[in-house]
Image (cartoon, rainbow, N blue to C red):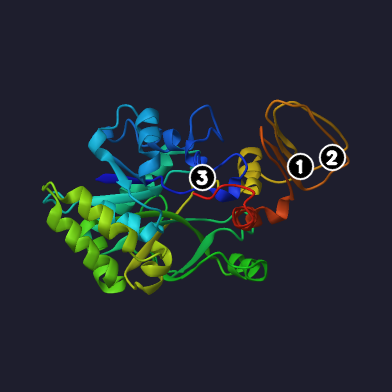
Amino acid sequence: MKFLIMAGGKGTRLWPVSRADNPKQFQKLVSERTMLQETADRLLPKFSIKDIFVATNKIYAEEVKKELPDLPKENIIAEPSFRERASAIALSCSLLENGEDETVVILPSDHLIKDKEAFWNALGEAEGFISKNTDALVTIGIKPTSPQTGYGYLRHNEEKLAEGRFGLYKVDGFFEKPGSGAVQKYLDGGFLWNSGIYVCRISSIMNRFERFIPDTYERIKKIRLAIGTSRLADVIEREYPLMDMISFEYGILENDDDVFVIAADFGWSDVGSWSVLKDSLMGGEGRNLVKGEHLDIGSENIMVYGSKKLIATVGLKDLIIVDTDDAILVCNKNDTQLVKDLVRKMEEEGKIKPL
């Protein structure tokens, strides 16, 4: 089994700590290790470092080497430009092919997982199912604990198809990042969060690109023909920026009828916004979360993420305050998903430099 860690995103919803030149996967948000290091650490020692690969943008390749010094150099897949995750997965899986049709686990680099052994157990159940159903793609679903609008959701059939600690089911549909009006309906309907962790045979992944994103697949074919030659880097440089700008979920999963889900529970959180980070670290709403020097009177359910200066608050409620050397963010806890839009607006107005 191979592991492909996706570490090429910009993490704009965690601005101003996460920046395009130093995004959240390289930040120490939940411990004294960066999110990328945490992701690699939870695979060890159960799995070998030689079986771990990191897909990232070429501008981050040196940082990956620095943070994971034991990772073989050839296991860093450097994308020449920013595309959506479907293109990154297509490129990476084409380079992972070595004559053996292995199972690959695709996982983000910026998730919090508290129970490592339960996580290993879920991966083992997925691999066992795929060994008998080689064309299947298995995602890890998470039982929701709150109405998150920034997560993707999925609905599954009630018939359990495989026994195990968690249980495996057929997916009936994917629903990406719903509005607030739809979330409660999803929760009432027994939907799961889609964790973005996928397990599949490499050949099956490539077959899906051929069926659902054929233009990207045609470009991948050109890259595969160049593997083992001196032309490989030039071909990747030419073909990759022309691949479809589309998410893996929208391009593949929403069109696929051979997807299954393990309904897992291992203390998972997609640390994709300041409110999610607060709730993940505090175990729910209500209490204040403080990092840095802070003095408060009478505030409730706030997060203060400071740097070097004292931050004093009085009588606040449901606010996020993030202070860095050159910027301050203040927003309502319920609106932190909009930080990504704010960053885009600042780029358009020249307030910050786009990457």
Say which residue appears at 78% left-offset and 27% top-offset.
310
Q: Residues within 10 Å of mark 3 (few under 14, many from 20)?
A: some
Nearest the viewer among 205 and 69 is 69
Nearest the viewer among 57 and 207 is 57
Labels 1, 3: front one: 3
Image coordinates for residue 254, horizontal then vertical, percent: 41, 71
Disc 2: which residue: 299
Q: What is the secondary structure assignment of the residue under circle 1? A: loop
For the residue marked with disc 1, what is the amino acid?
Answer: Ile
Nearest the viewer among 87 and 264 is 87
Say which residue appears at 62% left-offset and 58% top-offset.
341
Which quadrant of the structure image shows residue 209? bottom left
In the rendered structure, the answer to whether residue 234 lies left or right of residue 11 reads left
Q: Are marks 1 and 3 in contact (CB under 8 Å)?
A: no
Distance (Cα) linking label 1 and label 2: 7 Å
Which quadrant of the structure image shows residue 345? bottom right
Q: Residues within 10 Å of mark 1 (few under 14, many from 20)?
A: many
Q: Are marks 1 and 2 in contact (CB under 8 Å)?
A: yes
Going from N to C along the chain, the mark reached first, 2 or 3, is 3
Distance (Cα) linking label 1 and label 3: 26 Å
Disc number placed over residue 302 in the picture, else none: 1
For the residue marked with disc 3, what is the amino acid?
Answer: Ala
For the residue marked with disc 2, what is the amino acid?
Answer: Ser
Say which residue appears at 53% left-offset and 32% top-offset.
28
In the rendered structure, the answer to whether residue 349 lies left or right of residue 37 reads right
Distance (Cα) linking label 2 and label 3: 32 Å
Disc number placed over residue 20 in the picture, else none: 3
Q: What is the secondary structure assignment of the residue under circle 3? A: loop
Image coordinates for residue 9, horizontal then vertical, percent: 46, 49
Image coordinates for residue 211, horizontal then vertical, percent: 26, 73
Relative vertical location of residue 321 with respect to residue 104 in this rendering, above or below: above
* Residue 212 in view here: yes
